Amino acid sequence: MSKKPSTPDKADIPVATLRSMHLTMVRLRRFEERVAELLCGESEIKCPVHLYIGQEAVATGVCANLRQDDYVFSTHRSHGHYLAKGGDMKALMAELYGKATGCSRGRGGSMHLASPEMGLPGSSAIVAGTIPLAVGAALAFTMQEKDTVAVAFFGDGAANEGVFYESLNFASLKKLPVIFVCENNLFSTHMPVAECLADTNIYKKAEAFCMPGVRIDGNDVSEVFKTARQAVAEARAGRGPALIECMTYRWRGHVGPNYDLDKGLRTKAELDHWLAHCPIRQLEQFLLERGIMTEPGKRRIYESVDREIDESLVFAKESPCPDESELLDNVFKV
Amino acid sequence: MRQITYVQAINEALRQLLERDRRVFLIGQGVTSPWYVGASTVGLFERFPKRVIDTPVSENGVTGVAAGAALAGLRPILVHPRMDFMYYAMDQLANHAANWHYMFGGQMNVPLTIWGIINRGGEQAAQHSQALQAVFTHIPGLKVVMPSTPYDAKGLLAASVEDGNPVVFIDDRWLYNETGDVPEELYSVPIGKGVVRREGKDVTVAATSFMVLKAMEAAAALVKEGIDVEVIDLRSLKPLDGELLFASVRKTGRLVVVDGGWKTGGIGAEISARVVETEFKYLKKPIVRVALPDAPAPASSVLEKVYYPDANTIVSAVKQLL
Ligand SMILES: Cc1ncc(C[n+]2csc(CCOP(=O)(O)OP(=O)(O)O)c2C)c(N)n1
């Protein structure tokens, strides 16, 4: 499949879906903006944190097509996937604080989030590490004759690892219900994508493995939603995997709360260009123009989201730390 | 003598090695980035733009590329900015680089330095904390060194590059700001030689890398209680300086082995076995191992505190033997 033109058409997306995707994106954004504030100065959050700000439309648009029993595998930049798939915000905040009530009981930190009951079996901080796991889950679903699907979220950097290609091949060979979602945010730490890949059209890798591959505007939540809707439907119907390359941008630095404009890796103009293409603002403009949302209604959404974040913070701070005596618990399942 | 930090010593060694020998090149993730590899490669790309190669995240492929370049006559220094990511590289390291010389009857060799960095703490959790020296030490055909001082960092890096074999050179970010005497000119510290950091008569503490510092702290605390500890910095895990270690054990009859890796199947296990095999009759007490508990690294700092051994852990271990 070739590069599609941007399709701003939201007409065939139910209004309720548009509203709920808006709410999801605002939750992701406001949560991380709060985390960014909390990270400044002498922070009580000590684990490394990779912020998803700017990329919200990808997790949101994809997960809006998933059922609770579908699996989502994630990466070191995992807050967005976790929340969009229905992970509990309080448990996420508590995990950032290393608390016993965290979604990984304080053992994982920001890079390792799980919520099995919500279809979140875990996120890995090894680049490309979860891609074959998603393929394996899809294999299991097929063997169990379920119609659930697996999604692997990963960055452009993951397309440099051999296991990415091995996974695409195996998934296509066995026609497995897995959707590969590449979030191409143009950088792998300090390396621009063009310094990593001989061909930066990641979606084209699909062709070599006989599966559909498309590149879309990853900041347009409707386009993400519709593309994923089709891929999920095909996978659920047993017609095999797909690769979706979502063009997007992380507003902050690779790790931590700063914009990292002083590191000589990107220009202010580049950042400004992407700030102007904010996925949330784009959707809000549409919702306001169509009268689906009003200004006061929008304000209320932000206020209620901010209250939810306040509550998660209180929960995290008041929660107990893991006990020293539990250090060796869970090395094995007993 | 001039004092510089551990990380400056590595940077200087790299620069001088690149300067001295056109066969040397540096390859790996982040080598052109001023902030990625703990500033250890700062200024090198500007100076040697053709021989400082930043790479995509392709650990297995790039490790094979470096080994192949070594087979073709170059002397690559391959950096893995974090040991945890080296599992992807294990096939090229263990099946290829390590076996090549033996498997073809000694006709081809792989003069490759594999520089792996330990980077842990700070709630980085299980995939960003590992110290894999025991894994590499297990594999025939790989040499393994772990310098604990700026002097040895520079000298062992040079020796690794001069060696005709794959050498895994392991450093620890917790050492990067330690200062010490370092000659300005290039020199090498022999691979396979340990060093006595502190002479003592009561108990031998044999330690690796960052844990040597903790052993010295422990020794300083214990001397106030009248306990005289001999601290041995193993420096080289393979080949191991058995003679130095055995001589010390014969003198003290008591041994604590301190390593920052996991306990089971770890460096302490190997050292203990070696000592028991030949020096059993000199031992007055069982050997004690100080190591990481057999668990992945936890995130929570409360758990990190009990996970990583420190000087107090060593003090208690020594006291067990008296
Ligand atoms: C196997 C492995 N190698 C290196 C790293 C260090 N690292 C962490 S994130 C990252 C870049 C990943 O880039 P990308 O996949 O595009 O994701 P992004 O950070 O841009 O979201 C690298 C190289 C790692 N975590 N795992």
Image (tube, coloured by chain):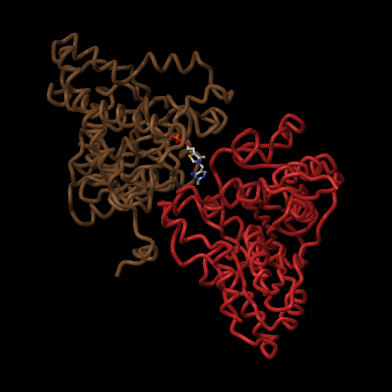
Q: Quadrant of residue B190?
A: bottom right
**Is any part of residue A178 visible from this angle?**
no
Residue drawn at (53%, 41%) of the image:
B57
Q: Position of residue B107 (x, y in %)?
A: 77, 62
Q: Which hue is chain B drawn in?
A: red
**Is any part of residue A26 visible from this angle?**
yes
How many badges with numbers are in the image? 0
Q: Residue furthest top?
A: A289
Left or right of residue B215, residue B197 in this image: right
Q: Position of residue B166 (x, y in %)?
A: 70, 58
Q: Is residue A28 above or below residue A327?
A: above
Q: Position of residue B251 (x, y in %)?
A: 75, 82
Q: Which chain is brown?
A: A
Q: In this view of the protein, which residue sits in the foreground, A98 or B24?
A: A98
Residue drawn at (35%, 60%) of the image:
A323
Residue drawn at (43%, 14%) of the image:
A273
Q: Is residue B181 above or below residue B278?
A: above
Q: Position of residue A235 (x, y in %)?
A: 24, 41
Q: Quadrant of the C terminus of chain B?
A: bottom right
Left or right of residue A309, residue B48 in this image: right
Left or right of residue B208, residue A304 in this image: left
Q: Residue furthest bottom?
A: B281
Q: Is residue B85 above or below residue B245?
A: above
Q: In this view of the protein, which residue sits in the foreground, A150 or B81?
A: B81
Q: Quadrant of residue B319?
A: bottom right
